[in-house]
Amino acid sequence: MKIYLDSIGCRLNQAEIERIARQFRAAGHEIVGEANVADLAVVNTCTVTSQAAADSRKVLRRAKRAGVDEIVATGCWVTMEPEKAAELSNKVVLNAAKETLVPDLLNLSPATFDLEPLERVPLPGLRSRTRAFIKVQDGCDNACTFCITTVARGSGYSRPIKDILADIQSALDGGTQEIVLTGVHLGSWESPHLPYRASPPEGGRTSPFPPRGAKRFLFQKARMGALIRTILNETSTPRLRLSSLEPWELEPDLFELWRDPRMMRHLHLPLQSGSDTVLRRMRRNTSRAAFRDLVAAARDVMPDVAITTDVIAGFPGETEAEFAETLDYVQEIGFADGHIFTYSPRPGTPASRMKEQVEKAIRKERNAALRAVFAEMGEAYRQKFIGETMPVLWESNQSMSDAGWTMQGLTGNYLRVRATASEPRWNQVDQVKLLKAEGDVMVGEIIK
């Protein structure tokens, strides 16, 4: 059977669709890059904003127009609006049943896929990514007033370390050069099953692993730092990147791990607002001061780290003064880039019921103002690296006949780079001298 897979929204959705692809392939089926040649389509939907929900419906309709015999809809939008999803698909799979989607469809035992993992092969077509997104955590126990994802995904839980390592190894066996850890609330990952923590030497820090010959240990739950160390110690991962990290519950010395050159120097820390009063209405477990300290701790270890973020424009009750605070604060932090969202009321969230909803026109104006500020900050960040030579992982290549191949890829600090090569270099890492910035892309020259 030929199967087409598509995903809307976050990297967690992408990680799930890649896992679904591996299971279908393990059962002997073919993953195809075009819906019009598929017997079955699986669409992993999103509902974080009203636009994401609309995009999800659009992708399902597109699959139907392509003539796919059977369409399976799953994901967050499907979980929140299953009746509407049923109108656009043959089968609806809620998030709670997503883990067994493939065995359920194929009438196989889930244990079928617990055997030797199949190596990861990038999805064909537009989803042919060199980076492998690895799901380590799902759900969230926070109560941000604007967030529908916590409703759609449920309570937080962490995947066992052995399953995470198995997924990483399958990706590495398939030639993956970069592993990206992802989850709804990635920083909340914890496990009681990693090694004991040794008593610290006098004046020193604790280690997540007991030294040889140590006689006294203190059992402690492992957190994100221990997970990263385990991956670095027990796999041959060349490049390790973390996706979004909520700016709380992070271990104080977590950023020390980025002294390892395999850790990619890019941190996505969602801020959402630069006003303390708005943050409180959002029920975000951070503040301007705490976020400022977090960024300073990261830059102490990595002065040139790319700090990116999310900001919501026009949250309910946001005054002109509060918005001005946000504008000033993001410039003070000096982000390398960011996602700017116009506030979108999501049914079922406390924010959707708040009084003083900001007019749509004002929300859009504030979005535009934030985008202009972030464009300036992004340009300033890129300019700092002109003349530098940095490793680039190539994610795409396009033939240019006699001129060779045009390559695009990412540096460790998430600069998008374009260069030409005499041969396709997809999924390879080259040293590239960055010559100039053209918009949001750095133009570089491959160093032989």
Image: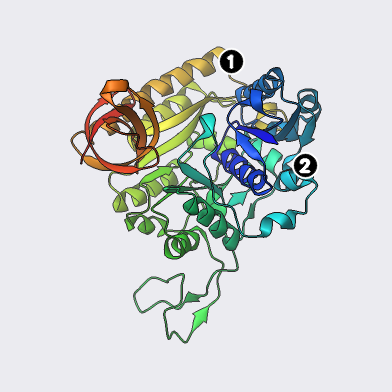
Label 2 residue SS: helix
State the mark number for residue 98. none
Under mark 1, the amino acid is Glu
Q: Is residue 160 left or right of residue 200?
A: right
Colouring scheme, one of rainbow, by chain, secondary structure, one colour: rainbow
Under mark 2, the amino acid is Leu
| Residue 40 percent across, percent down from the top left | 71, 32
- Residue at 42% x, 23% y: name it: 370
| Residue 212 percent across, percent down from the top left | 42, 82
- Residue at 60% x, 39% y: name it: 13
Q: Quadrant of residue 261?
A: bottom left
Label 1 to label 2: alpha-carbon separation: 45 Å
- Residue at 58% x, 15% y: name it: 360
Residues at marks 1 and 2 touching, judged by CB atoms closer than 8 Å: no
Mark 1 surroundings: few (<14), some (14-19) or many (≥20) residues within 10 A: few
**Residue 38 sits above or below residue 241 on the image:** above
Residue 336 vs residue 239, the one in the foreground: 239
Q: Quadrant of residue 369?
A: top left
In front: mark 1 or mark 2?
Answer: 2
Residue 397 vs residue 431, the one in the foreground: 397
Q: Is residue 292 visible?
A: no
Residue 234 vs residue 318, the one in the foreground: 234
| Residue 79 percent across, percent down from the top left | 74, 35
The residue that disc 1 covers is 359
Q: Is residue 205 visible?
A: yes
| Residue 171 percent across, percent down from the top left | 51, 50
Label 1 residue SS: loop
Mark 2 surroundings: few (<14), some (14-19) or many (≥20) residues within 10 A: few
Query: Does label 1 or label 2 sit earlier along the sequence?
Result: 2
The residue that disc 2 covers is 105
